[in-house]
Image: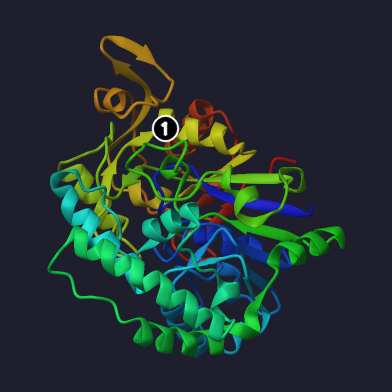
Amino acid sequence: MPATSVIGLQWGDEAKGKIVDLLTEDHDIVVRYQGGNNAGHTVQFGGQTYKLSLLPAGILRPGVESVVTGGVVINPRAFLEELDGIVGLNGGVDRNLLISNRAHVVFPWHMAEEAVLEKGRGGDAIGTTMRGIGTCYRDKAGRTHAIRMGDLVRGESFRDRVETVVGHKNRVLQALDPESEPLDAEAIYSEYSQYAERLAPFVTDTTSHLHKALAAGRRVLFEGAQGSLLDLDHGTFPFVTSSNSSGAGIHSGSGVPERAIERMIGVVKAYTTRVGGGPFPTELDNEIGQHIRDEGNEYGTVTGRPRRCGWFDAVATGYGARLSGVDCLAVMLLDVLGKLEEVQVCEAYEIDGERTTDFPAQLEDLARATPVLRSMPGWQADLTGIRKLEDLPVEARDYLDVVAELVGFPVDIVSVGPDREQTILVDRS
């Protein structure tokens, strides 16, 4: 098939990186199409742990092309640090790397603006990672003060752009925070010119490249970042990311039309997590929640922040699955629940006395939602060495069946550990 996509269906952190890494050997190209270095993917194999934020997980496979498209916002320093780290661990992986000339660039003024804006929100802070991602997307939408990778590698015209933008941003920052230090246009130009020199060989028209690749029958894998419930337009606004992180963002972010994608894989945790603020109906703010957090090592790849943990929410996940148009599910971290005597799944919400399986659009309605929970016996077994579905305890198989039933899509992949090999592929032939 020409193209496959891997999409997170919850509030991010679903372990998408492992599935992308697993599928990469059957593809020629892996594509990152939205987000920035606010997204973290962890991949483990061969005794090594790789933490990626901007680079596609395909960068870890020799001979596979890695493409970063125009929907991504790029912090050049973070990008190069990540690339150098991977090269140091895994050899010359950068030879098959392409970066879109349409991708927007994150600058120091974006981080400064974000810090000032988040500080001003006080108790209403939305939980940004403070990496300038949202403010970079804001400039992209505003157009006037945006700078793209194609501009970055243009020499003297880039100097003029930096001077113009810095003049404006200094006035904005001074108005927002009179104590802020002014930005130095020359210092920024000098620093980013060095990044441009290193990145220029990779910068190209990735949209045209992907169109030609698909026409030639090359197999393309799209790697989603964050999760469907964090989608700017369709997620739990305003506690969302600044891009379309559901399946809806693939086409705008990459320039590849929807009809080119033949398989959409929705990735879910066997439970639910969330980072930062916003309603979370199944949250377990108790010893069970802490147990899941410890067993699952639920701390942010990028920020290190502890994640909020709760039972699997089939209402929220089913919405994410329909939104992204998935064909099947990959259930991750099933092993994390292995020590619990009882597990629960949210099959509906009760809002103001009314039962519903619709995911609320309004934050206030979601905040009032009480989860309707289905209790099931736990399996109390170590799953990490199991490689076949039929070898799972019957309780674990029943749990997977309930997840598939409530979400509405079959489970095709089950992860029972962080390593590439700790995966069960469901045979439906």
Residue 217 appears in the rendering: yes
Viewed as shown, does residue 303 lie left or right of 120?
right
Viewed as shown, does residue 63 lie left or right of 370?
right
For the C terminus, the quadrant is top right
**Amino acid on which the number 1 mark rests in the picture:** Ala
Q: How many marks?
A: 1
- As drawn, the residue found furthest toward the top would be 353
Answer above or below: position of 220 versus 310: below
Report the residue marked by disc 1.
Answer: 316
Dot 1: element? helix
Applied colour scheme: rainbow
The percent position of residue 341, horizontal first and vertical second, equals: 27, 38
The percent position of residue 420, horizontal first and vertical second, equals: 53, 66
Give the residue at x 48% y 52%: 141
Q: Quadrant of residue 366?
A: top left
Give the residue at x 47% y 38%: 233
Viewed as shown, does residue 255 lie left or right of 315?
right
Give the residue at x 18% y 48%: 121
The percent position of residue 322, horizontal first and vertical second, equals: 56, 31
Q: In which quarter of the image is residue 286?
A: top left
Answer above or below: position of 180 versus 20: below
Viewed as shown, does residue 245 lie left or right of 222?
left
Along the viewing direction, whichever of 13 and 235 lies nearer the viewer: 235
Along the viewing direction, whichever of 164 and 321 lies nearer the viewer: 164
Along the viewing direction, whichever of 36 and 92 lies nearer the viewer: 36
Q: Quadrant of residue 42?
A: bottom left
Residue 49 appears in the rendering: no
Along the viewing direction, whichever of 60 and 125 lies nearer the viewer: 125
The percent position of residue 46, horizontal first and vertical second, equals: 51, 78
Disc 1: CA contacts within 10 A as few (<14), some (14-19) or many (>=20): many
